[in-house]
Image (cartoon, coloured by chain):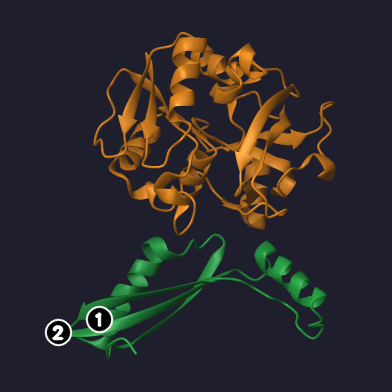
Chain colours: A orange, B green
Amino acid sequence: MKFGVVVFPGSNCDHDAYFALKHNLGFEVEFLWHKDTSIPDDIKCVVLPGGFSFGDYLRAGAIARFSPIVSEVFRFAQKGGLVIGICNGFQILTESGLLPGALLKNTSLRFICKDVHIKVVNNNTPFTSLLEQGKVLRIPIAHFEGNYFAGDDILKELEDEDRIVFQYCDAEGNVNEASNPNGSLKNIAGIVNRGRNVLGMMPHPERYCDPILGGTDGALIFESIINFLKI
Amino acid sequence: MANYIAKVKVMLKKGILDVQGKTVENALKTLGFENITDVRIGKYITFNVDADSLEKAKEIANSAADKLLYNPNIETYALEVTIFEGNV
């Protein structure tokens, strides 16, 4: 079993994801080029990495969604394959309709790059299978457009179907306005699709997989994926 | 076949906080423009279309807007298509 990390023109966390998966966690991983028209059979989880695919022109993720590989990611997800979109990857997932809602500009109108705390509000997903409900993770964010927005009907659907996976919180796990870095609706930091096999999240777990970088909470998400796939 | 020009105006939906507009509005207020309210910032996109008729050109332009130029979750657009009479 392998991870596949998609490389778009403008991706800049693709190598971080590759390094974290291969060297910090010891998993098999290969790059997938945005023009590829197939996903090898041994890939069980596709990572859409952070960055500025196609320069974030028009809207973040809007052009990447039409890359040939994204049609393949659609098919892969429909068959139950695991997909994790991180930051720009989350933006691509919302633009492509694999996940609902949209990521607006941060309310501060600033690019925010800092550690945040996120709370695991749903551990019944492949991406949180090793985590306790309510566990607080410390993971960095680095984005200008991470302000999650969805209409009332979509928000209700996400809540009713228990599809909010991570919420921004403080170190003690309190979800409140003060711990919301970007204005996201309900402090949403990550959601899954109905099938629970596609996760989009703004924080960067791949940046916190190595103690030398300041934290290892991100590794728990990738280890959860492996744990799920082995079951 | 004639050449038409399409002008697409994309705006954030009403009800979605336009943080850029708000910031510009605050700056204008600071400069003394107290009568200015509801500043909103959108995108203006133009492109030329070769088509047999104005109707066809509009159809193509609408389709382009629907497919890529705006995100219906958060934006609305207005489209204007006219015969292209050269760059004025």
Q: Kindly tell me whether residue A43 is visible in this rendering.
A: yes
Along the horizontal axis of the image, is A5 left or right of A120? left
| Amino acid type at mark 1 | Lys
Amino acid found under the numbered disc labelled 2? Met
Picture residue at 40% right of the left edge, 79% below the top: B7
Quick check: can you spot residue A163?
A: no
- Which badge, 1 or 2, is on the more N-terminal residue? 2
* Residue at image location 81% in from the left, 74% down from the top: B30
Of the numbered discs in the image, which one, if any, rests on residue B56?
A: 1
- Compared with B87, A108 (above or below) is above
> Residue farthest to the front?
B31
The residue to which callout 2 is attached is: B1
Vertical placement of residue B55 versus A183, above or below: below
In percent of the image, x 62 and y 18: which residue is there? Answer: A213
Q: Nearer the viewer, residue B86 or A83?
A: B86
Instruction: Name the quadrant containing residue A207.
Output: top right
Question: How far across and down, in percent of the image, does residue A212 sit?
Answer: 62, 13
